[in-house]
Every structure is written in structure tokens, then in C-alpha cells.
Image (spheres, helix red, strand yellow):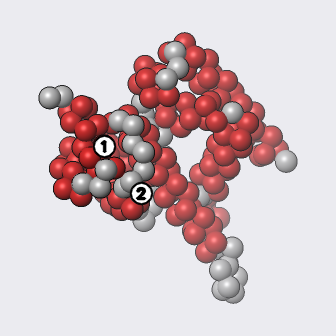
Amino acid sequence: MGAAKTVTLLLRDWRSGDQAALDELLPLVYAELHKLASRHMRGERANHTLHATDLVSEAYLRLADAGHQEWNDRVHFFAIAARTMRQILVDHARKRNAGKRGDGERPVTFDENAAAAERPENLLALDEALTALAKLDDRRARVLELTYFAGMKQDEIAAAIDIAVSTVARDLRFAEAWLCSYMREERDA
């Protein structure tokens, strides 16, 4: 039996309440989750307090808590995992930003060059833009998210959300253009 089919069957068993399926599932998906986390971490600052392994662990805990979610198949699971990892990084950036704004502490002098390398605002702005796009067109936001955060190919995305590959390509072009325009407008505002 192929790995993808095995993962899909284990996800369905887990969803049905079989906790042993979760124990079998983790070794099968860990390497791919780690690659996904590494891809997410590449866009982060060099001295980020989270590492890919930490991100996998946190995502695993959140996914395990949502164990009875309707996982359709392996592709759907990894799409949800990618979204979960992105949300963890966004939450981390928000906490970091709260600390930068004082978080109840007195202001201190800072080194602007050191602060420039640690800008969680970029991730927050991207998350805000993706949220705005999802309100406008959820499918196109999902295509963008699956491409850049889950690292999926267009044929995988087409299968995951049940649309034609050509539609994925069009949606991706639209979403990228819309995102650039939105980010430019927000930056200029």
C-alpha cells in the first residue's frame, strides 16, 4: 500500500477516534512536516526563537487537539498543517510585537540596526493581507496559501480543492497580483 493511501487511511481512523492510528501516523508524516516547517522558517529572521523542530512540535500538538477534524486525505492534512504552522508563527510575531510596544514596561533606547533585522510586522502584514483576500475570495487565498506555505504543486492543489489545474494557475496569478497591490497600498497608507 502506498504511503499516501496509508496516511489517508490512518487519518480517517484517527478521525473516527482510534488513538493508535495517531501513533502510527506520526512517523509517516514527521519528515514531511519537518520539511514544511523548515520552509516556513526560511522566511524568518536568523535569531528566531523557534526552530523547525519546535514548529513541528507545536503544530503537532494543535493538530492532535483537533484530531476529530474532517481530514479528507493526506493532501488536506498537510494543507491544514501548513496553515497551522503559519498561524503559530503569526501568533509568535504578535506576542513579539506586543513586547516591542512596551507590554507595560518603560521605554528604553534601542539600536535601530538590530531592530531592523527583527521585524515580525512583515509576517503580520502578510497574514492580514491573506485574511483580507480570503474574505474577498476564499478559494484564491487557499491556492496562494497551499502554494507558498504548504509547498504544494499546482496539480496537488487542483486535486485537493477539486478544481482544474488551469484554474489553479489563474487563481494563483490573481492572488499574487492582488496581494502585491494590497501590500503596496497598506505600506503607502
In this rendered view, identify the residue nearer to me: 68 or 154. 68
Q: Residues within 10 Å of mark 2 (few under 14, many from 20)?
A: few
Q: Is residue 105 left or right of residue 68?
A: right
Q: Which residue is mark 2?
A: 66
Give the structural element (helix, strand or loop) at label 1: helix
Q: Position of residue 96 (x, y in %)?
A: 57, 68
Determine the image quadrant of residue 60: bottom left
Q: Position of residue 146 (x, y in %)?
A: 49, 34
In this rendered view, identify the residue nearer to me: 131 or 6. 6
In this rendered view, identify the residue nearer to me: 159 or 84. 159
Q: For the residues carrying marks 2 and 1, which lies nearer the camera in this image?
A: 1
Q: Amino acid at mark 1?
A: Arg
Give the structural element (helix, strand or loop) at label 2: loop
Q: Amino acid at mark 2?
A: Ala
Determine the image quadrant of residue 180: top right
Q: Which mark is residue 12?
A: 1
Give above or below for 128 relative to 32. Answer: below
Q: Which mark is residue 84?
A: none
Residue occupying image coordinates x 80% and y 40%: 185
Residue occupying image coordinates x 49% and y 47%: 83
Q: Residues within 10 Å of mark 1 (few under 14, many from 20)?
A: many
Does the rendering let one see residue 16? yes
In this rendered view, identify the residue nearer to me: 5 or 99. 5
Give above or below for 169 relative to 75. Answer: above
- Outermost front residue: 16
Determine the image quadrant of residue 48: bottom left
Q: Name which of mark 2 and mark 1 comes first in the sequence.
A: 1
Residue occupying image coordinates x 48% and y 58%: 88
Looking at the rendering, in which quadrant would you find the N terminus?
top left
| Spatial separation of the CA atoms under disc 2 and disc 1 | 13 Å
Give above or below for 181 relative to 105. Answer: above
